[in-house]
Every structure is written in C-alpha cells, then in structure tokens.
Image (spheres, rainbow, N blue to C red):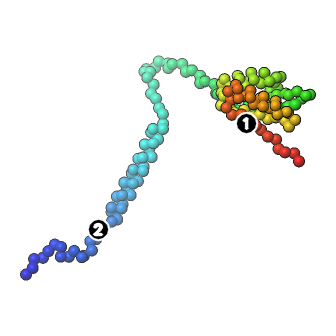
Amino acid sequence: MRCPSVYYHRNAAIDLPMTPMIDVVFQLLIFFVWTAGFQVTEYLLTGSLSSATGTLPGAPRTPPPPERDFDDLVIRLFWKQGQPAWRLNDTPLASLAEVRARLRAVAAINPAAPVILHPDRDVPLGHVIDVYDVARRVGFRKVQFATSEARG
C-alpha cells in the first residue's frame, strides 16, 4: 500500500479570499493620502514666537518700506508748432533734458518699470529715437512702443 502524499492533490484550486486584503490596501491608501495633505501645509505656514516675556510692551514697529511698484510710464510725443512736446503720464514736460531727469529719478527707484513710447503720427522718427535712447541710458530695461489704429 502506498503512503498518501501531501502533494497528491496538487491540481486542486487554491482559494484565497482577496476582498479583505483589498480593503486593507484601500484603508492604508486613504490614511497616507490624508496625512500627507497636512504635512505640506505645515511647511507653508510661517510662524514666529515672541521672545518677550511678561507684560512689557513690545518693540516699536517700523513702518513697511514704500511700495516700489509703478504703473506703466507712458511718454506721449506731440509735434507742436514745428517742435516736439512731451508728456509723461499726462504731465507736460518742457524739454528732452526734463524727460531725462524725470526718467532718471524713476529708474533710481525701479528700473524694471515698463516705459511705453506713444508718438503721434506727425512726430519725426529722430525725436522718438532720442526719447528711446534716453530711457535706455538711464537704466530702463523694458521700453515698448504703442501704436495707433490705422485710419482709413
């Protein structure tokens, strides 16, 4: 007589219940996603504790520095009585030297402010180039041209 072997019924299908294992995997996934969401927020929130103790008044706060952003600087060029005329953001300027002085003062504060040249049609190109050169020499990096719609 033959001894029964453990491997004798090897062809029988092994039935493993997968549902509890899938439930556990989803539970772990939800746990890690939930906790990872709060971890990023902790690093983004800044906070500082006061080193002062007791009821002493704190150090006087200094006012914040003035804002360094400007609107676009629009330079209008006109041709009046055979001579050029300038306007910087609707402020009339008498000469190219005054344009240079105003642009130099603004460039000392914020050279990244955009300068837009808006010449009239009858202004000779040489005067437009002069204002462009002045804006670049005083330190502005963005000098752009505005165009008018074609009439017709």
* Residue 121 visible in the current orientation: yes
- In which quarter of the view is residue 62 placed? top right
Which of these two is toward me, 116 or 59? 116
Q: Report the disc number at residue 144.
A: 1
Q: Are marks 1 and 2 in contact (CB under 8 Å)?
A: no
Say above or below: 9 vs 38.
Answer: below
Residue drawn at point x = 41 percent, y = 53 percent: 30
Residue drawn at point x = 34 percent, y = 65 percent: 19
Q: Residues within 10 Å of mark 1 (few under 14, many from 20)?
A: few
Question: Which comes sooner in the sequence, label 1 or label 2?
Answer: 2
Which of these two is toward me, 13 or 41? 13
- In which quarter of the view is residue 111 placed? top right
Q: Report the disc number at residue 114.
A: none
Q: Report the disc number at residue 16.
A: 2
Answer with left or right where residue 92 lies relative to residue 22.
right
Q: Helix, strand, or loop for circle 2? A: loop
Nearest to the eye among marks 1 and 2: give it.
1
- The Cα atoms of the two marked residues, 1 and 2, are separated by 73 Å
Spot the residue most to the left. Answer: 1
Say above or below: 121 vs 17.
Answer: above
Q: Helix, strand, or loop for circle 1? A: strand
Residue drawn at point x = 82 percent, y = 28 percent: 86
**Spot occupied by residue 1 in the image (x, y as percentages of width and height):** 7, 81
**Spot occupied by residue 95 in the image (x, y as percentages of width and height):** 82, 23
